[in-house]
Each structure stands twice: as C-alpha cells, then as structure tokens.
C-alpha cells in the first residue's frame, strides 16, 4: 500500500498559492487526484491479488499454435465426451508449484505490456501532470517572486489603510448622489408651488430612511503602528514592482508548462487508445515447458482484465477532459495581452486616477488574481497610488506631530517673530494650521509641501521660509498670502524652481531668493517679473547671475535694500542699478568685482554699501562717494586692498568703515579727517603702526585693530573719549599706555595675544569696563591691584 501522506507534498502550496490558481487549474487538480486514485487502486489490486491463472491445453499439437484459447478448450472437451473421466474434469497431473511456475511464466511472456503495467503508467503520468502544474511554484527563480507577491498581497488585502482609503472614496461617491437627490427634491418642491409645500415636506420625510441606508460606512481610524505598517507596505510594493516588471519569467514558465501538458496529453491519449484493446480476459500462452510440465500450450485468464478495461475507459475520459482544459488555458494565454494590466476600471470606481498600469510578470499575476477574486487587485491597487501614499503620510504626520508637540518648537527668530521651524519631514502636518499664534513658518528639506485652505487660520502669519521645500498653493491660500504675507525666503537648487505664486504676493515687503541659474542662462539672468510686488522694499538674490536682472527695475520706485550674493561668479553688467533712485542699502557680495562699480556713485539715496568678498585691489574711486551724500556705512572687507587713498578725507559723513581682512600695512593720516566716523574696523591686516591723527576722531566708539603687527599705540588714540570697544588682540604690543584710563566710556577691551608683561593701573579709571568686557590672559588680570579687580568684578 502507498500511504496517502506521501502525496501530501503535492498539496502543500495550495493554501498559500491558491489565489494564483484560476478555475481551470483547480479543476485540473481534481482531475489529477481522480486519475491518481485510479492508478493507486489498480496498483493495489495488482500487488495484492493473483495476476493471471493458466491451465494446460489438451488439443492436438498441430492446431495449438493457431487456435485461440476458447477453441482449445472446446476441442479438449469434445474429444472426451464419451469418457467417464469427464464427470470429474480433465486431469492434468500438475502440482501447485508447477501451476505457479506456469502462471508467472505466461504473465511475463504472453500478457501484453500495456495490460501488465497499465496502473503504474497511470500513476506515472498523473505524477507528471502534477509536477507540470506546480513546477512554477517550486522553481527557485519563479517561486521566490510568487511567495513575495503572495505575502505582500495578503498584507495589502488585510491592511486597515486599504479599508480606510476605499471607505473615503466610497463616502465621496455616496455623497455626490445624495446631494443630487436633495437638489432634485428641492427643485421639485419649488416648482410645485406653495400649495404643494406640505406634500414636499411629506416626501422629504419619507425619503429620510433611504438616506440612512445609503450612508457610507464609518471610516476607521489608524493608530501609529498601523500607519507605519502601511507606510512599509508602500515601500515594499514599489520595490517589488520595479523588480518584477523587469522580466517575464513567470509568464514564460506558465506557458511552457502548459504546452508541455498539452504534448503529454496528446501522447498519452494516442497510445492509450491504441493499446486499450490489448487488455483481454483470456490469453493464449505457448511456452516450451514440456520437459517440466508435460505441456507446451496453456490457456490463461487475466483476472483483472475486466476491471482494468473499465478503469482504462475512465482514465481516458479524465485525460480527455484534462486535455480540453489545457487547450482552453492555451487559448486564454495567447488570445489576451496578459503582459499588460490596466487599472482603468479601478481608477473609475475608486477615483484614484494616478494608479499606474503594470506590465510583464506583475501584470500576469494580477490577471491570475482576477480569475480568483478581482477584489484582491482592487485593494492591491491602493498601494500603487501616489495619492493614497500621500494621504497615508499625511495621516502619519498628524499622528506624530500633535499640536502640543509643535507648540513646544515655537521660538523667536532674529526678526522677533514667533517662528515654527520644521526640518526634513515627509510633508506638512495639518496640525500646523491649528497654531494661530504662529507669525513665521520655516520649512527646510520637506520634499512635498502643499498648503491647504486651512492656511487662512494662521491669521498672524507674516513670514514664510521655503528652504529646499517645493510648495504648492491652492487659489484660496494664494489670496490669503497675497494680503497677509510680508516676508518670504525661498532656497532651491535652481531659480526656475521658485513657485510662480511668489511673484504675485502684492503685500510682500521682503523677498529672499537663493538658487543657481543653469550655466547657459546665467549671463542672461532672467527673473520673473516683479511688477505685482508693489510693497517690496528688500530684495535679496543669491545666485550666479552675470548681470543685475532687468526685472529689478520693476520695483525701482520703492526698493530700499538690494543684496546680490554671487558666490564668486563675476558680475559684469550693473547699469540697471542707476534706476534704483530710492535704494538705501546695497550689497554686492562675492561678485568678482575688481573695482568699485561706477553705477554705485549714481545712487544719491544710498546709505550703506557692502562690497564684501570681492577682488578689490585699489579703491581710488572712493573719491566719487562724495556724490553719495547720505552714505554712512562702507564695507570693503574681505578683499585685497593694499592701501587707502588720501582723499578718503572727503567722506566726512561716513560713520562706519570696514576694511578688515585686506592687505593694508599703513593707514593714511587723512583718515583722521573723517570726523563723523563712529566705527573703524581694520583688523586682520598687516598694520605696523597707527597714525596719531586717529585721535581727531572724537566720535569714534568702536575701533578694531586686532590681528595686525602693531608694536606701539599712539598716545593720541586715547583722546577718543567716546570709545566703547577697543580690540587690540593678537598684535605685538609690549605695553599699554596708562592713558587708557582716560577712556571712561570703554566697556570692552581685548588684549589677548600680545607680549604684555603687566596692565596699567589706570584701567581702574575706566568706569564702564568690567571683568566680562576685559579679554586678557588670566596672569595679567591677576597682576592688577586688588582694588582695581574688585571694582571690575562689581556688576
């Protein structure tokens, strides 16, 4: 007996892979089980019972080889009719061993091979059919993809997010017909007139139960764990789709095994039909065993012939049905585009118009899934939709970033506004718009920002910063920002990525843009029109422009501050600056300038000029600044200036002069004639001495000469009685004049990095100087008299 458990392995894949089995594969499996039972039953009979029974033939020898077994028996009976032995049958004089020998010998020589091995052939062919049917479930290259697909499919089908997404769509679909019905009832009641108002109300009351029936199911809420699981499913589906759509091995393997089954069916059917007639109950056997048994001819009966012939008939019928199924499968495979799958019906039903069509093995498996249950592909499609994924991300964001957590991140920015800063999030939480007290919103490295209509709840919002965070804005939110937003900062890889709605914010006062132009467009430097920005006062552009953008002149009538940071790219054309008649502050940072641009001297309203980090070597043009009568701040720091011309004295209205990080070795004595100077920064140069004329700067409050090579300070310097900050650090000073005590307003003194041996006691006369404002080595500070130190330590 063959245990049934031996065949269990052929059904192990059924619970997991049943969704990939269309009805014809299921029917074929049942047929193979029936054929296998026929084979096993025949094999059992073949093993447990006698196979053939033979009797010697008593007919004439010359007729034995030609006469059939039936005629031999009749002949033997007719010759002995008159004999008394007939009453007890023919005596053969053979013992049991001789009969067994003859039976086995005749079974091997006289019985046709088909009659002998029929049940075994049935078992072998059936097992081959089973192998062909399930081979793609076992082959490593295909089984891995199938197992992965089934695993993901089951999780997608059972995911709470699938139910929520489809419920939301179902709610929308239910809502629209309901609204249409209400509109129809209202219109009908109005047309009926006042006399039928009661009937209209009655009809409305009768219609109420129908509304209850058509209400969509309640949308389930996802907790944080379920949201994270759904997020992981989206990633798995993306990676699996990329992997499976690359090839068609599943489709090819399924075709090959189906073609192989058809070929096997044809071969089995042909030879069974040819040889089924060989199964006969009576078999004539002629063997030369006369020396052993005394007989050479025998008449044998195949005991299983009748049963085997019936089983063979049933088996051939099952094989025919199996073959028809295989031919149907081939027709299904070759008459449909199974390597392409369209979700058009799902898109129409769910409203998720972004569900993509798939191809190759992914498409083929979805076609098989539809044969099992089309609901699987519908629920699976939810995880192919980017809209669905964005909804899930939004839901997870709202779970993670609650209103209380966001409120803890609020802080004042440099402009004094209450700012909420969010960085590197997958989206913008809806809870942000519940913080009505927010005045500034800073979004950095957020890949997908969509401002919902709820943006209008931020009634105090005045500033938005979008740093590598592309943002979409609906029309209703555009209207709100257009009337409320004062400051916007946009930073992106290329300036053409700046949202167009930015240039329509008519209440905007400050616009800060940072991004590069493509190399081929940098020279033209075309910027969107700024004509709508009627209130713009500050424009900052950090890019690689070759000239001042022409659109800057659109705001020439009210622009007060212009900042161009060119990151080292050379700025060639600056003639557009001449049109900025009311410009007060101008920054041309890292613009590759070698001379002070002449266009600057036409800015009569200019108050501050910053030419930081350029390539200025000479500033002879500084004389022309006398035309800029309102100029109070001049920053020429971080350049390569070797000397300051004498006519700097013409800039008597100058209040702040920055010349740090240059190559100065001396300062002109005429600098002392800039009587309005309040701040002078010449640090990080190569100065060996300071002119005594600096003592004429009676308004000087801040002097920075650190990081030079000064060995001695002129005593006249201490005539600047308004000095509050004196930075002398990292020079070669060996002593500090006691006259430093005359600087009563001094509050910050830096002396570190010099060669001082002691500090003058006169520091005690600097009433505003405290220990926190004195930057000096500890040993020098400890050398001061105790009363001086005590006075400095008193806050």
Image: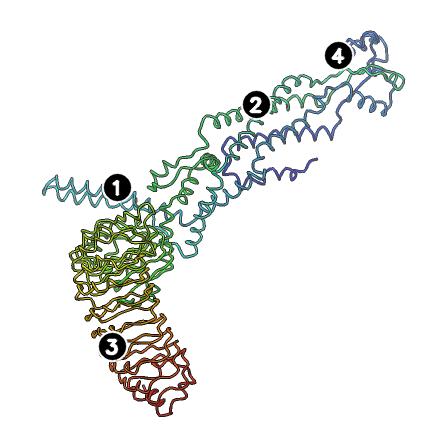
Q: Position of residue 85 (x, y in %)?
A: 86, 13
Residue beneath disc 4: 70
Q: Residue at x 90, y 17 (%)?
A: 291
Disc 2 vs disc 3: Cβ atoms closer than 8 Å?
no
Q: Which-is-in-front pick, marks 4 and 2?
A: 2
Q: Residue at x 33, y 85 (%)?
A: 737
Q: Position of residue 47 (x, y in %)?
A: 73, 30
Residue beneath disc 2: 320
Q: Secondary structure at mark 1?
A: helix
Disc 4 vs disc 1: Cβ atoms closer than 8 Å?
no
| CA separation in Å, label 2 and label 3 | 111 Å
Residue beneath disc 1: 177
Sequence-wise, the earlier of marks 4 and 2 is: 4
Residue beneath disc 3: 700
Q: Which-is-in-front pick, marks 1 and 3?
A: 3
Sequence-wise, the earlier of marks 1 and 2 is: 1
Q: Is 308 on the left-hand or right-hand side of 364?
A: right
| CA separation in Å, label 3 and label 4 | 143 Å
């Amino acid at each position: 007996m063959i245990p049934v458990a031996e065949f269990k392995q052929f059904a192990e894949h059924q619970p997991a892979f049943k969704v990939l089995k269309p009805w014809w594969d299921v029917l074929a499996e049942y047929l193979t089980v029936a054929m296998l039972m026929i084979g096993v039953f025949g094999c059992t009979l073949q093993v447990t019972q006698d196979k053939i029974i033979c009797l010697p033939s008593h007919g004439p020898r010359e007729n034995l080889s030609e006469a059939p077994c039936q005629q031999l028996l009749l002949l033997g009976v007719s010759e002995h009719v008159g004999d008394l032995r007939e009453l007890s049958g023919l005596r053969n004089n053979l013992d049991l061993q001789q009969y067994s020998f003859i039976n086995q010998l005749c079974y091997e020589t006289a019985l046709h091979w088909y009659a002998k091995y029929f049940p075994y052939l049935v078992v072998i062919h059936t097992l081959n059919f089973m192998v062909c049917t399930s081979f793609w479930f076992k082959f490593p290259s295909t089984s891995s993809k199938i197992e992965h697909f089934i695993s993901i499919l089951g999780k997608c089908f059972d995911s709470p997010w699938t139910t929520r997404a489809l419920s939301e769509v179902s709610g929308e679909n239910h809502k629209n017909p309901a609204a249409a019905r209400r509109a129809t009832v209202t219109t009908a009641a109005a047309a009926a007139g006042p006399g039928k108002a009661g009937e209209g109300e009655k009809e409305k009351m009768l219609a109420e139960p129908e509304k209850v029936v058509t209400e969509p199911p309640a949308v389930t809420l996802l907790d944080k764990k379920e949201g994270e699981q759904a997020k992981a499913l989206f990633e798995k589906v993306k990676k699996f789709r990329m992997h499976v759509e690359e090839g068609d091995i599943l489709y090819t393997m399924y075709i090959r095994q189906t073609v192989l089954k058809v070929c096997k069916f044809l071969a089995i059917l042909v030879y069974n039909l040819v040889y089924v007639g060989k199964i006969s109950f009576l078999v004539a056997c002629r063997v030369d065993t006369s020396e052993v048994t005394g007989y050479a001819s025998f008449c044998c009966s195949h005991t299983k012939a009748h049963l085997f012939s019936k089983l063979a008939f049933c088996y051939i019928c099952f094989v025919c049905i199996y073959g028809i199924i295989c031919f149907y499968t081939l027709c299904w495979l070759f008459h449909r585009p199974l390597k392409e799958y369209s979700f058009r019906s799902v898109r129409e039903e769910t409203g998720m118009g972004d569900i993509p069509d798939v191809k190759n093995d992914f498409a083929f498996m979805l076609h098989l899934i539809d044969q099992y249950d089309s609901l699987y592909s519908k629920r699976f499609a939810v995880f192919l939709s980017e809209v669905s994924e964005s909804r899930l991300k939004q839901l997870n964001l709202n779970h993670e970033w609650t209103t209380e957590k966001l409120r803890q991140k609020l802080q004042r920015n440099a402009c004094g506004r209450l700012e909420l800063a969010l960085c590197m999030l997958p989206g913008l939480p809806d809870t942000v718009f519940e913080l009505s007290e927010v005045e500034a919103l800073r979004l950095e490295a957020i890949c997908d920002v969509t401002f919902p209509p709820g943006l209008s709840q931020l009634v105090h919002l005045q500033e938005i910063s979008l740093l590598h965070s592309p943002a979409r804005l609906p029309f209703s939110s555009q209207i709100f920002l257009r009337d409320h937003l004062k400051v916007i900062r946009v930073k992106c890889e290329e300036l053409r990525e700046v949202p167009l709605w930015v240039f329509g914010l008519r209440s905007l006062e400050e616009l800060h843009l940072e991004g590069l132009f493509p190399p081929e467009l940098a020279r033209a430097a075309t910027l969107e029109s700024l004509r709508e920005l009627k209130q713009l006062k500050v424009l900052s552009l950090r890019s690689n422009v070759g000239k001042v953008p022409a659109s800057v002149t659109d705001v020439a009538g009210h622009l007060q501050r212009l900042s161009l940071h060119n990151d080292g790219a050379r700025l060639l054309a600056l003639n557009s600056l001449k049109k900025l008649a009311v410009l007060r502050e101008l920054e041309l940072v890292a613009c590759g300038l070698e001379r002070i641009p002449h266009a600057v001297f036409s800015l009569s309203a200019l108050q501050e000029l910053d030419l930081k980090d350029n390539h200025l070597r000479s500033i002879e043009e500084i004389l022309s600044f006398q035309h800029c009568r309102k100029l109070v701040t001049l920053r020429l720091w971080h350049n390569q200036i070797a000397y300051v011309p004498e006519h700097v004295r013409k800039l008597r209205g100058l209040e702040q002069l920055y010349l740090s990080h240059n190559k100065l070795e001396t300062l002109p004595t005429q600098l002392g004639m800039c009587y309005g100077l309040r701040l002078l920064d010449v640090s990080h140069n190569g100065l060996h001495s300071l002119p005594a004329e600096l003592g004429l700067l009676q308004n000087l409050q801040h002097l920075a000469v650190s990081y030079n090579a000064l060995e001695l300070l002129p005593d006249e310097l201490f005539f600047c009685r308004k000095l509050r900050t004196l930075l002398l650090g990292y020079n070669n000073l060996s002593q500090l004049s006691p006259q430093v005590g005359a600087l009563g307003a001094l509050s910050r003194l830096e002396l570190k990095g010099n060669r001082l041996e002691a500090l003058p006691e006169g520091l005690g006369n600097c009433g505003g100087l405290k220990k926190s404002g004195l930057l000096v080595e500890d040993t020098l500070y400890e050398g001061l008299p105790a009363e001086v130190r005590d006075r400095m330590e008193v806050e």
